[in-house]
Image: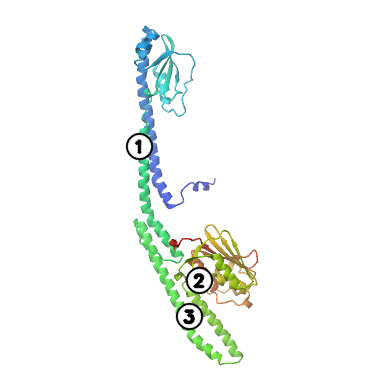
């Protein structure tokens, strides 16, 4: 049997689950104790009060053996606040309201301690009528319900609700203070995934502090690695430009087929160095701003020529991106589509919690088993694409994937159903508040 639907009944947040773990046992225990107390209260106190009334009814029955009914009514019953009269003979079949819990004790107590009881009517909320045989025939004795039932059990309920409310408030304050460091840690981790380093001061319980310090150490190591990678690639690329420039100047003074072949190699090396610099450029240094993605992509598609079609789906909204890095990433995808195909479709789709930019072409595409490798730096899948169009240095998709990750999104490759070539989905989370950055 599948019980997955039960999971939907439980809280999904850490705060909700912590509150449930803390409050449910306390409230369950309090409710159980209250129910047991109420049961004892109703049974014990109600039985004792009913027995006291049984003695008064027994006294009335004894008086009826030696006095007339009218005399007993005027002299005895009125003083005892009992409504004594002849019974009309219509039974109520021990009528009792469904919510009348104390009536479960009153009825058997009267039957067990008063011989000759023929009916007990508890249908009225504030009045009880007992039909009983007497020396003067069947009579009915009516009296107030307060004389056989406790009237103050609501005090227990009031105290239960009050203490439950106080416990809930205390638990709410306690949980909020304990979970606040975890929420700050989660916010810092989410911001770091989008490329922004926010200040974090570990606080809270020992375990939470340990997790916060571990995150800070990890963030520092990652930042050092990124900085070292950037410096290394930038330095190497910069150092290579000096001899490359001298080679270009010397080739400019030479003629012949050999010079043209060398010039082609030098141009390829220059393109490779430019790719290295683009890859080493730290896009996270750029500040995120609110822009109109639709307008930015429309301008980019117009510059790329008539073979690039643009479409928008969903309800547009402003979102925060690093415009320079995102424009470079989308331009890489569009240029790849035009390099290996003849047509390109760019679709901007506004989803509920994200924005998806889909670029499709009619080229040869990339085999499914090679799509993951294509996102790694310096990987060129020439066998999967048209080599006559040029293959680059294998950094275009890696740069685009890095930009997507710096925004907290992802780049996913697939096959285009519309054009039959490569499909690249650049998905970014929906972020509309600058406070999140």
CB under 8 Å between callouts 1 and 2?
A: no
Among the two numbered marks 1 and 3 on one chain, the one whose residue lies closer to the N terminus: 1
> Residue drawn 59% across and 70% down?
301
Against 337, residue 271 (above or below) is: below
90 or 51, which is in the foreground? 90
Cα distance between the residues tagged 3 and 2: 21 Å
Q: Position of residue 261 (x, y in %)?
A: 59, 87
Among the two numbered marks 1 and 2 on one chain, the one whose residue lies closer to the N terminus: 1
Q: Position of residue 194 (x, y in %)?
A: 46, 65
User: Residue 237, which numbered label?
Assistant: 3
Label 3: which secondary element: helix
Near mark 3 (Cα within 10 A), the count class, few <14, some 14-19 or many ≥20, is: some
User: Residue 268, which numbered label?
Assistant: none
Q: Which numbered mark, 1 or 3, is in the foreground of this view?
A: 1
Q: Which numbered mark, 1 or 2, is in the foreground of this view?
A: 2
Circle 2 is placed at which residue position?
A: 324
Label 1: which secondary element: helix
For the N terminus, the quadrant is: top right
Cα distance between the residues tagged 1 and 2: 63 Å
323 or 228, which is in the foreground? 323
Near mark 2 (Cα within 10 A), the count class, few <14, some 14-19 or many ≥20, is: few
With 394 as the anchor, is 224 left or right in this view?
A: left
Q: Position of residue 396 (x, y in %)?
A: 54, 73
Against 280, residue 207 (above or below) is: above
For the C terminus, the quadrant is: bottom left
Circle 1 is placed at which residue position?
A: 159
Among the two numbered marks 3 and 2 on one chain, the one whose residue lies closer to the N terminus: 3
Residue 62 seen in this snapshot: no
Cα distance between the residues tagged 1 and 3: 77 Å
Residue 295 seen in this snapshot: yes
């Amino acid at each position: 049997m599948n019980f997955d639907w039960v999971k939907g009944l439980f809280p999904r947040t850490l705060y909700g689950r912590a509150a449930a773990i803390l409050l449910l046992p306390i409230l369950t225990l309090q409710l159980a104790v209250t129910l047991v107390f109420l049961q004892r209260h109703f049974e014990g106190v109600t039985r004792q009060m009913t027995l006291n009334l049984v003695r008064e009814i027994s006294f009335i029955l004894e008086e009826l053996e030696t006095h007339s009914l009218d005399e007993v009514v005027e002299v005895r019953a009125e003083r005892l606040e009992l409504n004594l009269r002849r019974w009309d003979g219509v039974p109520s079949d021990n009528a009792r309201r469904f919510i009348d819990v104390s009536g479960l004790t009153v009825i058997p107590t009267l039957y067990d301690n008063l011989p000759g009881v023929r009916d007990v009517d508890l249908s009225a909320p504030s009045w009880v009528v007992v039909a009983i045989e007497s020396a003067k025939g069947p009579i009915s004795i009516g009296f107030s319900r307060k004389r056989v039932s406790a009237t103050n059990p609501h005090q227990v309920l009031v105290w239960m609700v009050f203490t439950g409310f106080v416990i809930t408030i205390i638990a709410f304050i306690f949980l909020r203070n304990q979970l606040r460091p975890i929420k700050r840690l989660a916010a810092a981790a989410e911001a770091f995934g989008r490329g922004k380093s926010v200040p974090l001061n570990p606080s809270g319980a020992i375990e939470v502090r340990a997790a916060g310090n571990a995150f800070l150490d990890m963030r520092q190591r990652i930042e050092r690695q990124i900085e070292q990678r950037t410096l290394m690639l930038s330095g190497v690329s910069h150092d290579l430009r000096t001899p490359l420039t001298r080679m270009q100047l010397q080739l400019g003074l030479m003629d012949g087929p050999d010079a043209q072949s060398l010039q082609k190699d030098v141009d390829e090396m220059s393109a490779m160095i430019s790719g290295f610099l683009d890859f080493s450029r730290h896009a996270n240094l750029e500040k995120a701003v609110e822009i109109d993605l639709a307008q930015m992509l429309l301008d980019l598609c117009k510059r790329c020529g008539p073979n690039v079609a643009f479409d928008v789906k969903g309800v547009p909204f402003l979102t925060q991106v690093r415009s320079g890095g995102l424009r470079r990433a989308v331009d890489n995808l569009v240029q790849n589509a035009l390099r290996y195909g003849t047509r390109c479709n760019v679709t901007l789709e506004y989803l509920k919690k994200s924005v998806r930019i889909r670029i499709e072409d009619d080229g040869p595409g990339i085999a499914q088993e090679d799509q993951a490798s294509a996102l790694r730096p310096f990987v060129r899948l020439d066998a999967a694409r048209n080599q006559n169009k040029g293959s680059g240095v294998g950094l275009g998709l890696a740069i685009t994937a890095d930009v997507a990750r710096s925004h907290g999104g992802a780049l996913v490759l697939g096959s285009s159903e519309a054009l039959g070539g490569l499909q690249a989905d650049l998905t970014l989370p929906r972020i509309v508040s600058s406070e999140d950055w």
